[in-house]
């Protein structure tokens, strides 16, 4: 009995070591699996692009007289429209306006500027970000 327990423990440790050595380095960016139709939208994975869009949204807030900081944008989508060169972006981001930080659903049409925010009552998912962006921030708007 004791030999079986030691053998099982040794096997479990060996499996754990193999798993750890075969896993990718956690600092390496991992591809995000997306269920989006590539002709409809794309998931924005580029940190430089994400930061650029986030910074523009924050500038828009300042122009509107809103004080606060937008950060930690995730599930950022660029929505495509047939025959349009204009871009629309949508994402879930954190907003800290000085009170209690909260997650918001946000989108904007980059040409016309239809910045829209939803502060509650949404699911954090690609389909929800896509439908919110298409409904509230259509290209050419």
Image: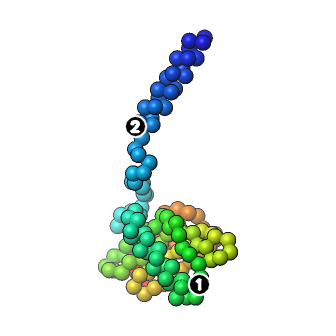
Q: Residue at x 41, y 81 (%)?
A: 110
* Colour treatment of the image: rainbow
**Label 2 environment density (alpha carbons within 10 Å; few <14, some 14–19, many ≥20):** few
Residue at image mark 2:
22
Q: What element does badge 2 sit on? A: helix
Task: For the C terminus, give its image quadrant.
Answer: bottom left
Residue at image mark 1:
66
Sequence-first tag of 1 and 2? 2
Q: Quadrant of residue 96?
A: bottom right
Residue 90 visible, this orientation: yes
Calculate the distance from the C-alpha at mark 1 to the C-alpha at mark 2: 48 Å
Q: Give percent across and percent down for residue 46.
A: 38, 64
In the depicted structure, whether residue 103 falls above or below residue 62:
above
**Label 1 environment density (alpha carbons within 10 Å; few <14, some 14–19, many ≥20):** few
Q: Give percent across and percent down for residue 115.
A: 50, 82
Task: For the N terminus, give its image quadrant.
Answer: top right
Q: Give percent across and percent down for residue 2.
A: 60, 12
Residue 106 relative to residue 140: left or right: right
Q: Residue at x 51, y 21 (%)?
A: 10
Q: Residue at x 43, y 69 (%)?
A: 50
Q: How many callouts does the rendering have?
A: 2
């Amino acid at each position: 009995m004791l030999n079986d327990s030691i053998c099982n423990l040794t096997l479990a440790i060996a499996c754990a070591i193999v798993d750890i050595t075969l896993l990718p380095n956690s600092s390496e960016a991992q591809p995000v699996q997306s269920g989006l139709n590539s002709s409809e939208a794309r998931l924005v994975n580029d940190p430089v692009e994400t930061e650029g869009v986030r910074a523009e949204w924050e500038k828009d807030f300042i122009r509107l007289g809103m004080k606060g900081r937008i950060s930690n944008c995730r599930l950022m989508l660029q929505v495509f429209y047939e025959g349009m060169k204009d871009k629309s972006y949508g994402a879930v981001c954190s907003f800290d306006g000085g009170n209690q930080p909260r997650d918001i659903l946000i989108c904007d049409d980059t040409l016309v500027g239809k910045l829209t925010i939803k502060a509650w009552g949404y699911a954090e998912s690609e389909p929800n970000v896509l439908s919110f962006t298409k409904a509230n921030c259509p290209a050419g708007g």
